[in-house]
Amino acid sequence: MANFSVYLGAVGWKHAQWENDLYPGDLPEDWQLAFYNSQFRCVYLPCSMWQEASDAEVSSWLQETREGFRFVLQMPKKPDGETLRRAKRFGERGVPEGQVDIEWLEGVADLRGLAKRLQKAANEGAPLFLISRDGMLAQLRQVSELMEVLKV
């Protein structure tokens, strides 16, 4: 299984500003996750999105994404047994947000500081998740280029 030291993604894979920018105009909506998976290494799922998804939907999401892709699951403060059961549907590809190091990408990125964090994550082997709350595609592309330059 592919494991990365740095995972880049956004909250969800559906953002209005991505139509005809990230996603080709003729791409069917039900293919968007598969396409997103080709551009990013993770997606952050709010509680309501993953908890309300059927077993068939979760299974489809897992099939549409590569093995190294991760689903970062927002967790309630006190998850009950049903919540934990629903989280287990993702197997090792689902990671509860409280168990991973998340760097939220907001505003203008400090690329020097971010480069240091990326290198530290790569050297230590502890995964770092870079997640955009608002799906700012220009920033995501900039960070992706930085990751390519640093080979992380």
Image (tube, rainbow, N blue to C red):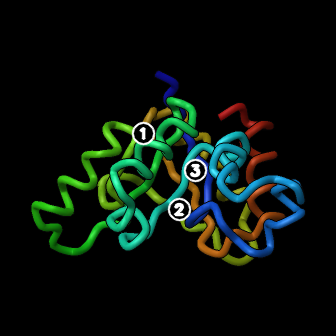
Residue at 17% across, 67% down: 79
Residue 18, image x, y percentages: 79, 66
Local packing at callout 1 (Cα closer than 10 Å; few below 14, some 14-19, many 20+) is: some
Give the alpha-carbon distance from disc 3 to disc 2, as whole Å. 9 Å
Which quadrant holds residue 110?
Answer: bottom right
In the figure, 116 relative to 11: above or below?
above
Q: Secondary structure at mark 3?
A: helix
Answer yes or no: do the residues labelled 3 and 2 have beta carbons within 8 Å?
yes
In the figure, 111 relative to 4: above or below?
below
Q: Which residue is mark 1?
A: 126
Q: Earlier in the sequence, mark 3 or mark 2?
A: 2
Q: Earlier in the sequence, mark 3 or mark 1?
A: 3
Q: Which residue is mark 3?
A: 117
Residue 88, image x, y percentages: 25, 46
Q: Secondary structure at mark 1?
A: loop
- Looking at numbered disc 3 in the image, what kind of residue is underneath it? Arg
Local packing at callout 3 (Cα closer than 10 Å; few below 14, some 14-19, many 20+) is: some
- Looking at numbered disc 1 in the image, what kind of residue is underneath it? Ala
Q: Nearer the viewer, mark 3 or mark 2?
A: 2
Local packing at callout 2 (Cα closer than 10 Å; few below 14, some 14-19, many 20+) is: some
Answer yes or no: do the residues labelled 2 and 1 have beta carbons within 8 Å?
no
Q: Residue furthest left?
A: 81
Give the alpha-carbon distance from disc 2 to disc 1, as whole Å. 13 Å
Residue at 72% across, 45% down: 35
Q: Which residue is mark 2?
A: 103
Residue at 81% across, 46% down: 145
